[in-house]
């Protein structure tokens, strides 16, 4: 009886050791796998070149549109303080867009998860906060701008667009931050994870282009009121 | 061959236990500094390490062959400690994990915290298995004394 009991204890000890062996083996190799996955890069050279050309063309359009106004030669009836203010805010936005901090992403040939994350953060800080919120949104809250024609139409359009961009970028940031957790993942998580770098990067790039489209629209409005007024 | 491997894993498990303990302690201290928590709360997390170390010392002093010469147990112990070391090192060094550098602490506390529960399960499991293997050893000693 005692012998059987000791045999059972022995068997139980081996079972526990076996389970611990399985668990540690699983955790060890899933860590190697996760490490390898996070180290993967995506070739986005041609994608970046196309987008760089598009950004440069939009920047050029904005610059041409705001340069139609010159305070010393302007003979129209519109409020010059408002026109000066709008021009200065759009110029500051152009400086942000053309800064090295933002342009460096177009030079990347291979993009990793860290690059995608940094792109999200820089886009959020520079384009959304520094340009769209601090310059454009605040511009439409000034009294001098409110005197310009079609102010109400453009303001509501800008508000909706900026809010949409601010909402969408938070999702991408959270998604990348969650990639640090990797255990017992479902098939859906895995599928999302494999494309995370590329998906996040292109998602931010699309938002970037949308932000520039918004600036082009504002500059078109600016050009039309300067020429018309 | 089995003896050589057993000896290798036997020695390694002590070294790896110290390494795993040291790295875990380092990450937990940094984590508590960040959260401004009382350092006493770390003790709770380190109890399984202390229990296992105590059991290893008991095995060593009383020459309990049921544990000391158990290749599977020694191999599993090494695997567990290697896993803990790897998780701690990844939390400190793997900069591809974006939260590693986000708050400027240089350690991905979130990632490490996910594994704390598994670390405890593995260490307590090894302790229980160690005690059970000891009982087996005790039985043999009794039988030997009876035969004598």
Image (tube, rainbow, N blue to C red):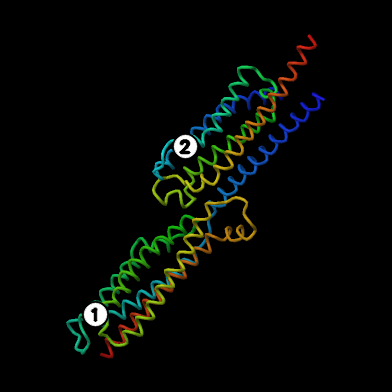
Q: Chain of mark 2?
A: B
Element under disc 2: helix
Residue at the extreme left of the image, as rendered: A72
Residue occupying image coordinates x 25% and y 90%: A229
**Is residue B79 depicted above or below A224 in this figure?**
above
**Is residue A82 depicted above or below B145 in this figure?**
below
Residue occupying image coordinates x 71% and y 20%: B138
Element under disc 1: helix
Residue occupying image coordinates x 20% and y 80%: A81
Neighbours of disc 1 within 10 Å: few (<14), some (14-19), many (20+): few
Residue occupying image coordinates x 39% and y 61%: A122
Q: Which residue is mark 2?
A: B42
Q: Chain of mark 1?
A: A
Closest to the observer, B144 or B97:
B144
Residue at the extreme right of the image, as rendered: A1
Viewer-nearest of labels 1 and 2? 2
Labels 1 and 2 within one chain: no
Q: Quadrant of the N terminus of chain B?
A: top right
Residue A214 pos. (x, y %) = 39, 77
**Is residue A32 depicted above or below B138 in this figure?**
below
Neighbours of disc 2 within 10 Å: few (<14), some (14-19), many (20+): some
Closest to the observer, A35 or B33:
B33
Residue A178 pos. (x, y %) = 52, 56
Residue A3 pos. (x, y %) = 80, 24
**Disc on res. A143:** 1
Q: Quadrant of the C terminus of chain B?
A: top right
């Amino acid at each position: 009886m005692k012998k059987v009991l000791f045999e059972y204890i022995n068997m139980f000890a081996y079972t526990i050791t076996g389970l611990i062996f399985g668990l540690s083996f699983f955790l060890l190799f899933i860590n190697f796998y996760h490490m390898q996955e996070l180290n993967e890069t995506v070739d986005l050279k041609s994608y970046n070149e196309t987008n760089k050309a598009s950004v440069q063309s939009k920047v050029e359009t904005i610059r041409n549109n705001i340069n139609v106004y010159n305070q010393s030669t302007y003979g129209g009836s519109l409020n010059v303080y408002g026109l000066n203010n709008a021009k200065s805010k759009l110029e500051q936005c152009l400086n942000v867009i053309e800064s090295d901090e933002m342009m460096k992403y177009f030079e990347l040939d291979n993009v990793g998860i860290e690059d995608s994350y940094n792109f999200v953060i820089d886009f959020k800080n520079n384009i959304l906060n520094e340009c769209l919120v601090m310059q454009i949104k605040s511009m439409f809250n000034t009294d001098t701008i409110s005197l310009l024609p079609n102010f109400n139409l453009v303001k509501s359009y800008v508000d909706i667009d900026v809010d949409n961009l601010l909402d969408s970028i938070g999702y991408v940031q959270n998604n990348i931050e969650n990639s640090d957790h990797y255990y017992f993942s479902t098939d859906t998580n895995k599928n999302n994870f494999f494309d995370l770098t590329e998906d996040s990067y292109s998602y931010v790039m699309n938002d970037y282009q949308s932000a520039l489209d918004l600036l082009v629209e504002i500059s078109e409005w600016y050009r039309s009121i300067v020429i018309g007024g | 061959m089995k003896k050589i491997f057993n000896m290798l894993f036997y020695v390694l498990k002590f070294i790896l236990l110290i390494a795993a303990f040291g790295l875990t302690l380092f990450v937990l201290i940094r984590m508590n500094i960040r959260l401004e928590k009382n350092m006493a709360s770390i003790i709770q997390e380190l109890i399984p390490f202390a229990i296992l170390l105590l059991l290893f010392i008991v095995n060593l002093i009383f020459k309990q062959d049921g544990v000391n010469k158990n290749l599977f147990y020694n191999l599993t112990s090494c695997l567990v400690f290697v896993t803990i070391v790897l998780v701690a090192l990844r939390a400190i060094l793997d900069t591809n994990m974006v939260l590693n550098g986000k708050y400027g602490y240089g350690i991905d506390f979130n990632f490490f915290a996910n594994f704390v529960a598994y670390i405890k399960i593995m260490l307590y499991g090894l302790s229980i298995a160690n005690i059970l293997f000891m009982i087996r050893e005790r039985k043999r000693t009794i039988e030997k004394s009876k035969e004598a």
